[in-house]
């Protein structure tokens, strides 16, 4: 009678492969080391994957699929926000209006979701950045980068046409700034052992993007005492 397949074998193989890829890169990783790490045979490996490249390909596909879902959700949320509240204005920014704060909260939540996903796949990002030389995945991270820059460029161009953002910035520069920032953060994550405060990262990113790095103006002491002191 044939031995039933282990329902947890694929998950164990993926976990072992991710650790091996992170240590040795795709070229240096060996299937026998992957299977030994999870006490499975090479036959069990080939039951689920044609090759170690195929295994990494599944991980990359899963990583990109969720990023695509995040992109789609962000576009829907932005469209719904602008339809309900209109575009954010300079006055909203200066006054930190309720509409601006709601927009910032929405955008920050979306970016935190992306950062959490990048943290969960930081080993895969690390392999694409540093461990895929000499394989079909060499250069894949830059293909992904180019595609994301183009997507953001098109969205920014559309928002410019709708007067939802300033028109004196080339869309490609904006897209490169956003995507380049995430690539570098992904590189940092791939070398971290302790999870950073991703909520703070997301908040800081949007504060910089929307408000810049110039110190916020403080109220003069006289104004503070008049406004906040006892009557």
Image (spheres, rainbow, N blue to C red):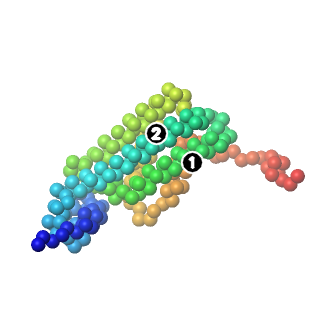
Tell me if mark 2 has few (under 14), some (14-19) or many (20+) residues whose alpha carbon lies within 10 angstroms of its own: few
Q: Tell me the residue at 60%/36% (across/down).
A: 85
For label 1, count other residues whose C-alpha is less than 10 Å away and answer few (under 14), some (14-19) or many (20+): some
The answer to whether residue 212 of the structure is visible from this angle is: no
Which of the 4 quarters of the picture holds residue 9?
Answer: bottom left
User: Which residue lies at the image location 39% right of the left edge and 37% below the top edge?
Assistant: 151
Q: Is residue 223 left or right of residue 82?
A: right
Q: Percent position (x, y) of residue 159?
A: 50, 31
The residue indicated by pointer 1 is 105
- Furthest residue to the front? 1
Element on which disc 2 rests: helix
Q: Image check: 121 left or right of 228? A: left
Q: Which mark is residue 25?
A: none
Q: Residue at x 52, y 55 (%)?
A: 199
Viewer-nearest residue: 67 or 85? 85
Whether residue 152 is visible here, answered yes or no, is yes
Q: Which of disc 2 and disc 1 is earlier in sequence? A: 2
**Residue holding disc 2:** 75
How far apart in space, not on screen, are marks 1 and 2 (Cα)? 15 Å
Residues marked 1 and 2 touching at CB (< 8 Å): no
């Amino acid at each position: 009678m044939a031995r039933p397949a282990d329902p947890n074998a694929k998950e164990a193989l993926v976990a072992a492969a991710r650790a091996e890829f992170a240590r040795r890169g795709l070229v240096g990783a060996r299937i026998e080391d992957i299977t030994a790490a999870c006490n499975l045979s090479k036959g069990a490996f080939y039951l689920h994957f044609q090759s170690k490249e195929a295994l990494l390909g599944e991980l990359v596909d899963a990583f990109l699929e969720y990023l695509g879902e995040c992109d789609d959700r962000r576009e829907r949320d932005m469209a719904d926000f602008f339809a309900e509240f209109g575009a954010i204005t300079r006055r909203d920014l200066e006054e930190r209006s309720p509409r601006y704060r709601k927009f910032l909260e929405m955008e920050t939540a979306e970016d935190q979701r992306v950062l959490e996903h990048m943290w969960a796949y930081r080993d895969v990002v690390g392999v694409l950045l540093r461990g895929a030389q000499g394989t079909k995945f060499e250069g894949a991270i830059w293909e992904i980068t180019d595609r994301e820059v183009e997507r953001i460029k098109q969205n920014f161009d559309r928002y410019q046409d709708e007067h939802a953002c300033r028109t004196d910035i080339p869309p490609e520069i904006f897209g490169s700034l956003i995507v380049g920032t995430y690539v570098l953060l992904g590189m940092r994550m791939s070398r971290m052992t302790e999870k950073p405060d991703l909520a703070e990262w997301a908040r800081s990113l949007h504060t910089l993007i929307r408000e810049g790095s110039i110190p916020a103006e403080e109220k003069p002491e006289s104004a503070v005492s008049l406004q906040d002191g006892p009557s």
